[in-house]
Image: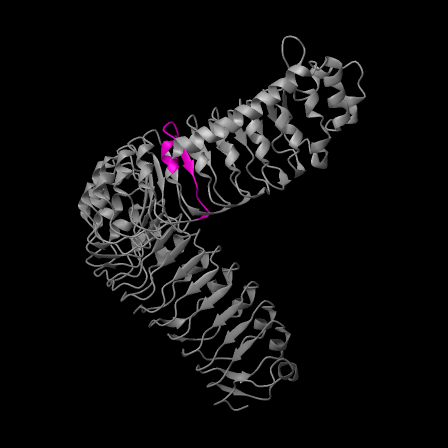
Amino acid sequence: MMSIICNMSLAVLIIIAFSCYNSIVAAPAPSKQSEASALLYSKWWSPSVIDNTTLPHCAWPGVLCDASGSIDGIRLPYGYQIGGNFSNMNFSLLSRLTSLDLSSNGLAGKIPLQICTLSRLTYLDLSFNSLTGELPPCVQNLTRLQVLWISYNHISGSIPPEVGNLERLTDLNLEFNLLNGAVPLTIGCLHNLQSLRFSSNNLSGSIPLELGNLAKTNVVDLSFNNFTGPIPSSIGNLTSLTYLYLQRNRLGGSIPLVIGNLTSLTDLYLQKNQLGGSIPLQMCTLSRVTHLDLSFNSLIGELPPYVQNLTRLQVLRISYNHISGSIPPELGNLERLTDLNLKVNLLNGAIPLTIGCLHNLQSLRFSSNNLSGSIPLELGNLAKINVVDLSLNTFTGPIPSSIGNLTSLTSLYLQRNKLGGSIPPEIGNLTSLNYLDLQGNQLGGSIPPEIGNLMSLISLNLRGNQLDGSLPPKIGNLKNLAYLDLRGNQLSGSIPPEVGNLTSMTYLYLQENKLSGCIPSQIGNLKSLVALKLHENRIHCAIPSNIGDLRDLRQLDLSSNNLVGEIPVQLGKLGWLNYLDLHNNSLSGSIPDNLKAIFPILLFSATKI
């Protein structure tokens, strides 16, 4: 069937080519003067070039001439901004043109049909412009074309089947347009094609079986479209393929077993489809693969131990699937791995100790599984790592002190496990840390003062543990801290005045503890504060009046404490405030009039107001 399609296309092409040939022979060869005239009246060049009568047209910016002085190439410098003048060029006077590069030059409007007369053209690049309209079928006349790039435009309509007549084509790039419809079956006629890029369009239908005819192709990118149906088994014929990008479509079925034929493959991206079934054993032959992403599908079964054969693997992402069983210890053989993401699956059992062999690992994400046991000490061997996410599992035991070896760490997420013991003081070694989340565990003891060493910290969440003792004054060193959540612990003592140094703070949650003493007046320094919640503590004294200086404050909850005195009139200056709760205190006096104007109904129950 494919040969019939290609032969019919070829027959049509011969007729068209013969017609074009006769017209070319019949027409006299363009003179150098007519070529210069075409450039002059195109309005592509600036007056400083056009008006320079001493400058020959072959010396104009981007104009290339052959030995005889005829124009054989135009490669305009970046940013010439041709705009709507694209169609001004009389291409019929440039019949010797072999190369036309107008990328990133602000082209607008439709592709002029006259461009199809350039029968000697081998290279055409119109990418990174604002072209509209459809890709003209007459492009089939450009039979010598080897490179066709029209990416990053606004080309709409379907891909014309006539494209299949461009049998010399080695590189076809139509990505980032508005193309729709199916990929034409004639794509299989492009036997010399090495790179096919149709990503980021609105293409639909199934991936044609005829794609398997492109034996020389090393890049196929059909990502970010609406393709449905299975990945065709003919994909296994593309044994020269090094890059296969099919992500973000709606492909279904299972991963074809013939994927194992693609032994030259380095990048395989199948994420965000609807693929099911298990990971095929045949993938063990992909010994050259460096990037493998199967995430956001519906894959089942276990993670096969043969993954150890993929020794060049740098990125392995199988997150958001239904993979079960334990993490195979053979993963530890993947010593080049930099990114390992298995989160949101059904994995169980312990993390294998061989995880410590992944010395090049930079990101480890195992969150939202059923993993258990203790966090292995060997995790401390991953000196290059910057993200560790083991959250939402059932890990028990202490946080290992070896965590302090991970001095490149920027994000540590251990929340919602069953971790016990105390926070190790070695955590103070993680001076690059931006995000630390230990909430929802069973951690006890006091907050180590070494936490004050984490000068890069942006977010600290220790809520819902069993922490006791007082807040360390060194917490005031964290001048980049924007989010602090210590609610739901057993913290006692006063809020240290050093909290006023946290000038980047936007959310401060200290509620549901046993804090006492006064609210420090230094809290008025936190000018970026949006939410301040101190309720359900044992705080006494008066409400400091300079809370009224926190002009960005939207939520203020001081309820269920032992606060006394009058409500500061300065609270009425908090124009953005939408939640105020002062109930269950011992406040006295009257409600300031300016507060009544903001809050017709106030939460002041159980007070003496």
Q: At which x and y percent is residue 180?
A: 52, 46
> In the rendered view of the protein, which quadrant contains the N terminus?
top left
Q: Position of residue 541 (x, y in %)?
A: 49, 79
Residue closer to the observer: 374 or 317: 317
129 left or right of 287 in image: right
Image point 30% across, 39% down: which residue? 337
Residue at x-position 72% and y-position 28%: 44
Q: Nearer the viewer, residue 420 or 325?
A: 325
> In the rendered structure, does residue 357 fall within the stretch colored magenta?
no
Q: Residue at point 21% right, 42% down?
A: 281
Does residue 178 appear left or right of residue 489 in this picture? right
Relative to 4, is 604 above or below? below
Measured as percent of width and height from the top left, residue 452 is found at 40, 56
Quarter of the image holding residue 60?
Answer: top right
Closer to us: 109 or 116: 116
Color style of the picture? one colour
Q: Quadrant location of the C terminus? A: bottom right
Give how far across and how far down residue 353 sits, in percent: 19, 47
Q: Is residue 119 visible?
A: no
Q: Report the residue that reaches farthest toward the top.
A: 68
Left or right? Give the position of 560 relative to 370. right
Q: Name the image quarter holding residue 190.
A: top left
Please say whether residue 225 is one of the residues in the magenta stretch. Answer: yes
Near-viewer residue (447 or 124): 124
Is residue 47 placed above or below 604 in the rendered structure? above
Can residue 402 be seen here? The reply is yes
In magenta, the rendered stretch is 210-226
> Could you tell me how many numbered marks the image carries?
0
